[in-house]
Structures are given as C-alpha cells and as structure tokens.
Image (cartoon, grey):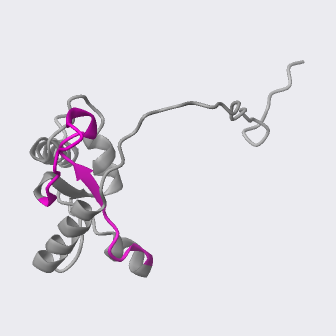
C-alpha cells in the first residue's frame, strides 16, 4: 500500500550556500527621493502611477509614504557618468513594478496602463 504525504509533510531543500562575485552599479537614492517628494507635493500622497494603488489607504500607517521607484533607463544601458533625472522615474506599486520588468525590453508605463485597462474590460465583460 502506498502512503502519501500531506502538504504539511512536504518540504524542499533551500539549496547550498554559494560564493559568487558580481559587478553591480548602485543607483543614487537622490533622484528617487526627489521624484517622490515632487509627486507627493503635487498629488498629496504617493500612489501607483499605473493602477492607482495607494499603500497608505490599504495598509494604514505602515503603508504611509511607501512606493517603489521604477527607473525607466536600465543601469546596464547607461555609461558610468550618466545622470539620472527624477523624470526618468515612475512611482509604482510592487505588482506593477514586477510587470514592468517582466519583458525585455521593459514595458513602458503607457503600455502597462493599456494592458491593465484591457484586462479589466475583459474581466468585466467576458466574451462568453
């Protein structure tokens, strides 16, 4: 007789520690700080420029002033002396940020907004 495992018994090893060497370019925090400050001054709060999600409305105090910054210019595509500008930054929620990076080249803000609108319409008005 075969004995099955329950979901509580099932487990997977995390993997071995590995030492890897990578060359990374650290982004300056200043452009993101300026972009957030300007956005908040203009709109009164920080929210996703794509879907409108507001962390403070959903999570209360812990979500206040939280938003992710999507740099529209990949660091890997710029020379070391490139000057990033606050206008090169889009303020986004975590979900939209992941979706922007889902393809190469990255989706643009306008493309993801259109995709989101199309999927919402399809959900509200299925073709069945």
Judged left or right of residue 25, residue 122 is left
Range of residues picked out in magenta: 62-86
Residue at x 79% of width, y 38% of height: 9
Quadrant for the C terminus, please. top left
Query: From where the camera sits, is residue 3 visible?
Result: yes
Across and down, in percent, residue 43 comes to 13, 76
Picture quadrant of residue 119: top left
Across and down, in percent, residue 116 comes to 19, 46
Q: Nearer the viewer, residue 54 or 122?
A: 54
Picture quadrant of residue 3: top right
Magenta span includes 76: yes
Judged left or right of residue 10, residue 2 is right
Main SS type for the magenta part? loop
Judged left or right of residue 73, residue 42 is left
Q: Nearer the viewer, residue 34 or 112?
A: 34
Instruction: Name above or below for residue 43 compared with residue 25.
Output: below
Residue at x 33% of width, y 44% of height: 98
């Amino acid at each position: 007789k075969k004995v099955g495992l329950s979901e509580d018994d099932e487990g997977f090893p995390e993997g071995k520690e590995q030492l890897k060497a990578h060359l990374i370019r650290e982004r300056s925090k200043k452009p993101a700080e300026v972009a957030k400050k300007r956005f908040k001054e203009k709109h009164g709060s920080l929210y996703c420029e794509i879907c409108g999600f507001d962390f403070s409305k959903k999570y209360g105090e812990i979500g206040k002033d939280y938003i992710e910054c999507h740099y529209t210019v990949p660091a890997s595509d710029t020379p070391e002396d490139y000057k990033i500008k606050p206008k090169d930054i889009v303020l986004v929620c975590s979900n939209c940020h992941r979706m922007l990076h889902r393809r190469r080249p990255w989706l643009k803000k306008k493309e993801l907004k259109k995709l989101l609108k199309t999927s919402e319409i399809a959900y509200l008005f299925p073709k069945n």
